[in-house]
Image (cartoon, rainbow, N blue to C red):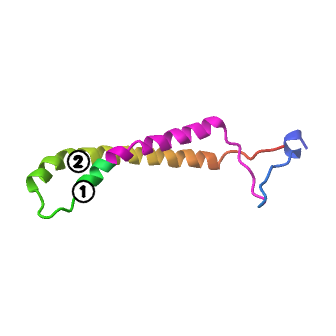
Amino acid sequence: MNEATKKEVITTKNKQPIKEISYQDMYRLNDTINQIDSWKETLSVLNNFFGNRDIPLNKKKIIKEFHASSYIFTAFYEDFLVRSTTLEKQIEELKTKSKVRV
Protein backbone atom coordinates (compact mmCIF):
# COMPACT_ATOMS: atom_id res chain seq x y z
CA MET A 1 0.00 0.00 0.00
CA ASN A 2 1.22 3.46 -0.76
CA GLU A 3 1.19 6.25 1.80
CA ALA A 4 -1.95 7.92 0.37
CA THR A 5 -4.09 4.84 1.00
CA LYS A 6 -2.74 4.42 4.54
CA LYS A 7 -4.01 7.86 5.60
CA GLU A 8 -7.30 8.06 7.47
CA VAL A 9 -10.23 10.20 6.37
CA ILE A 10 -11.24 12.74 9.04
CA THR A 11 -14.91 12.40 9.95
CA THR A 12 -17.47 14.29 12.01
CA LYS A 13 -19.22 12.92 15.10
CA ASN A 14 -21.79 11.34 12.78
CA LYS A 15 -19.02 9.53 10.85
CA GLN A 16 -19.44 11.84 7.82
CA PRO A 17 -16.22 12.64 5.91
CA ILE A 18 -15.03 16.25 5.95
CA LYS A 19 -14.41 17.84 2.52
CA GLU A 20 -11.35 19.91 1.60
CA ILE A 21 -12.70 23.42 1.01
CA SER A 22 -10.22 26.22 0.38
CA TYR A 23 -10.53 29.86 1.32
CA GLN A 24 -10.83 30.66 -2.40
CA ASP A 25 -13.86 28.33 -2.66
CA MET A 26 -15.54 30.12 0.24
CA TYR A 27 -14.63 33.52 -1.21
CA ARG A 28 -16.14 32.65 -4.61
CA LEU A 29 -19.31 31.37 -2.96
CA ASN A 30 -19.57 34.48 -0.77
CA ASP A 31 -19.00 36.72 -3.80
CA THR A 32 -21.88 35.10 -5.68
CA ILE A 33 -24.17 35.42 -2.66
CA ASN A 34 -23.23 39.11 -2.31
CA GLN A 35 -24.06 39.67 -5.99
CA ILE A 36 -27.53 38.21 -5.45
CA ASP A 37 -27.89 40.15 -2.19
CA SER A 38 -27.08 43.43 -3.99
CA TRP A 39 -30.56 43.34 -5.54
CA LYS A 40 -32.36 43.90 -2.21
CA GLU A 41 -32.53 47.67 -2.43
CA THR A 42 -33.63 47.74 -6.05
CA LEU A 43 -36.22 45.03 -5.48
CA SER A 44 -37.76 47.08 -2.68
CA VAL A 45 -38.60 49.71 -5.35
CA LEU A 46 -40.41 47.03 -7.36
CA ASN A 47 -42.11 45.78 -4.22
CA ASN A 48 -43.45 49.29 -3.56
CA PHE A 49 -44.68 49.56 -7.15
CA PHE A 50 -46.47 46.22 -7.18
CA GLY A 51 -47.52 46.41 -3.54
CA ASN A 52 -49.41 49.66 -3.97
CA ARG A 53 -53.02 48.59 -3.50
CA ASP A 54 -54.51 52.06 -3.09
CA ILE A 55 -58.06 52.46 -4.30
CA PRO A 56 -58.80 54.11 -6.62
CA LEU A 57 -55.77 53.22 -8.72
CA ASN A 58 -53.95 56.05 -10.40
CA LYS A 59 -53.82 54.60 -13.90
CA LYS A 60 -51.64 57.38 -15.31
CA LYS A 61 -49.06 56.83 -12.59
CA ILE A 62 -49.11 53.06 -13.12
CA ILE A 63 -48.63 53.42 -16.88
CA LYS A 64 -45.78 55.89 -16.31
CA GLU A 65 -43.94 53.63 -13.83
CA PHE A 66 -44.70 50.28 -15.48
CA HIS A 67 -42.17 50.68 -18.29
CA ALA A 68 -39.23 51.38 -15.95
CA SER A 69 -40.34 48.71 -13.48
CA SER A 70 -40.56 46.09 -16.21
CA TYR A 71 -36.97 46.86 -17.29
CA ILE A 72 -35.76 46.60 -13.68
CA PHE A 73 -37.51 43.27 -13.28
CA THR A 74 -36.11 41.93 -16.57
CA ALA A 75 -32.56 42.91 -15.56
CA PHE A 76 -33.03 41.30 -12.15
CA TYR A 77 -34.53 38.13 -13.58
CA GLU A 78 -31.73 37.63 -16.10
CA ASP A 79 -29.05 38.33 -13.49
CA PHE A 80 -30.77 36.10 -10.94
CA LEU A 81 -30.83 33.18 -13.39
CA VAL A 82 -27.11 33.59 -14.11
CA ARG A 83 -26.18 33.97 -10.43
CA SER A 84 -28.32 31.04 -9.28
CA THR A 85 -26.78 28.82 -11.97
CA THR A 86 -23.31 29.95 -10.88
CA LEU A 87 -24.20 29.26 -7.24
CA GLU A 88 -25.47 25.78 -8.10
CA LYS A 89 -22.23 25.01 -9.99
CA GLN A 90 -20.11 26.25 -7.10
CA ILE A 91 -22.03 24.09 -4.63
CA GLU A 92 -21.71 21.05 -6.89
CA GLU A 93 -17.95 21.66 -7.09
CA LEU A 94 -17.77 21.79 -3.29
CA LYS A 95 -19.72 18.54 -3.05
CA THR A 96 -17.18 16.77 -5.27
CA LYS A 97 -14.12 18.01 -3.38
CA SER A 98 -11.88 15.31 -1.99
CA LYS A 99 -12.06 14.29 1.64
CA VAL A 100 -9.60 15.57 4.24
CA ARG A 101 -7.02 12.92 5.07
CA VAL A 102 -4.62 12.70 7.95
**Please, what is the three-letter code of the amino acid marked with disc 2?**
Ser
Report the side of 26 relative to 35 (left or right).
Answer: right
Q: Quadrant of the C terminus?
A: top right
Q: In the image, which disc is placed on residue 78?
A: none
Q: Who is closer to the viewer here, 83 or 58? A: 58
Number of numbered discs:
2
Report the side of 69 relative to 7 (left or right).
Answer: left
Query: Disc 1 vs disc 2: Cβ atoms closer than 8 Å?
Result: yes
| Residue 83 lies in quadrant | top left
Report the side of 82 relative to 48 (left or right).
Answer: right
Q: In the image, which disc is placed on residue 69?
A: 2
Percent position (x, y) of residue 74? Answer: 28, 47
**Please, what is the three-letter code of the amino acid marked with disc 1?**
Phe
Q: Which residue is mark 1?
A: 50
Q: Quadrant of the N terminus?
A: top right
Report the side of 46 relative to 21 (left or right).
Answer: left
Does the magenta run of residues contain 83?
no
Q: Which residues are magenta?
A: 15-43
Does the magenta run of residues contain 42?
yes
- Looking at this rendering, what residue extends furthest in the top direction? 24
Q: Residue drawn at (40%, 48%), measured in percent from left and top?
A: 81
Percent position (x, y) of residue 20? Answer: 71, 43
Q: Main secondary structure of the magenta part?
A: helix
- Looking at this rendering, what residue extends furthest in the bottom direction? 55
Q: Residue drawn at (35%, 44%), measured in percent from left and top?
A: 41
Sequence order check, earlier mark of 1 and 2:
1
**Label 2 element class:** helix
